[in-house]
Amino acid sequence: MVNCFCGNQAVMRTSWTHTNPGRRFWSCAQIVTNCGFFLWFDPPMCARARAIIPGLLTARNALEAH
């Protein structure tokens, strides 16, 4: 269990940015009064994964849109 700066239990989320696709992190569970807590859970991905995953996500989203 990880606690944020608020003292509450942090939640695990998943990043879907182009620089960190699929990488998990801990953050504050509060949406409105977010304390700014942030801690990576996963190690950084290799350069090849960072290059390939966004393209795969784009292709998948295009298929789902049809």
Image (cartoon, rainbow, N blue to C red):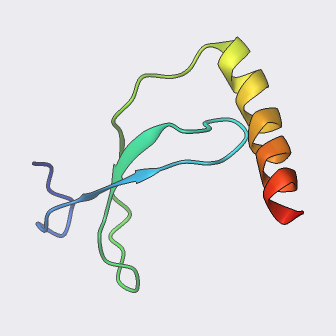
In this image, 7 relative to 57: left or right? left
Residue 65 appears anywhere in the view: yes
Residue 58 location in percent, x, y?
A: 82, 46
Instruction: Please indicate whether residue 63 sits to the left or right of residue 25 in the image.
Output: right
Question: Hey, which quadrant is residue 46 in on the image?
Answer: top right
x 22%, y 59%: residue: 10
Q: Nearer the viewer, residue 62 or 13?
A: 62
Q: Give above or below for 40 relative to 11.
A: above
Up-down relation of residue 41 to residue 32 (above or below): above
Vertical position of residue 35 compared to residue 49: above or below: below
> In the rendered image, is residue 38 in sight?
no
Residue 6 placement, left or right of 33: left
Residue that sits furthest to the front in the current view: 66
**Lateral position of residue 44 relative to residue 21, left or right:** left
29 or 52: which is nearer to us?
A: 52
Residue drawn 85% across the image and 64% down it: 65
Where residue 48 sits: x, y (%)? 72, 13
Number of disc labels: 0
Q: Give x and y (percent) for residue 14.
A: 47, 49
Q: Position of residue 37 (x, y in %)?
A: 33, 57
- Where the C terminus falls, by quadrant? bottom right
- Name the residue located 10 percent from the left edge and 48 percent from the top edge: 1
Q: Residue at x 31, y 77 (%)?
A: 30
Give residue 9's quadrant in the image.
bottom left
